[in-house]
Amino acid sequence: MANPNIVAVTAIYGKTTYYTPSGTAAVVLLPNAASSGKVFKINQIVAANVNGSAAVDTTVSLYTNGAVAQGSAPAGGTAYPIVSTVSVPADASLIVTDKTTAIYLEEGTSISVTSGTASGITYSISYEDIT
């Protein structure tokens, strides 16, 4: 897996994506394909409890060799939690990471999420797509 040289940047695109898992198993929030030629600088990940009536646990992980489509189960590799089984109160949000804690998502890796309640957490992630 190559790691693009970010000193020789040709483009930086600001992006934001959202996802609400419909189950309780780990799923990919943001994949970076193995041969993308890109690195993603993660600016912010927020987990918002949309359940409305109860706290919901969340886990957000960096996942090796799991760069499959958003919403798919990670394929192979190992999960390295950023936050692990953190309870998000009803109608509240958890800032998992922000610009003060830089994370670079290299080729062939992904960010995966697990919710304790189906459709209980909406995740948003803002990042820079660097080529």
Image (cartoon, rainbow, N blue to C red):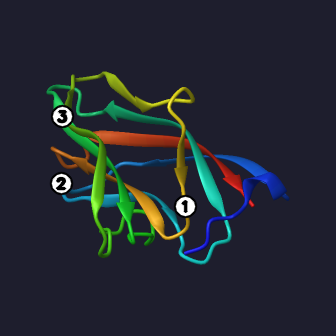
Q: Which residue is drawn at 38% across and 65% down?
A: 64
Q: What residue type is labelled 2?
A: Thr
The foreground one among 1 and 50 is 1
Q: Which amino acid does label 3 sit on?
A: Val
Q: Are marks 2 and 1 in contact (CB under 8 Å)?
A: no
Residue 63 image position (x, y, % from top left): 36, 60
Q: Do the residues labelled 3 and 2 touch (CB within 8 Å)?
A: no
Q: Which of marks 2 and 1 is in front?
A: 1
Q: Which residue is drawn at 54% across and 26% down?
A: 100
Which disc, if any, is residue 24? Answer: 2
Q: Distance between the residues labelled 1 and 3?
A: 29 Å
Residue 130 image position (x, y, % from top left): 71, 55
The foreground one among 120 and 46 is 46
Q: Name the residue under label 1.
A: 106
The foreground one among 108 and 112 is 108
Q: Can residue 122 be seen in this view?
A: yes
Q: Name the residue under label 3.
A: 56
Q: Which amino acid does label 1 sit on?
A: Glu
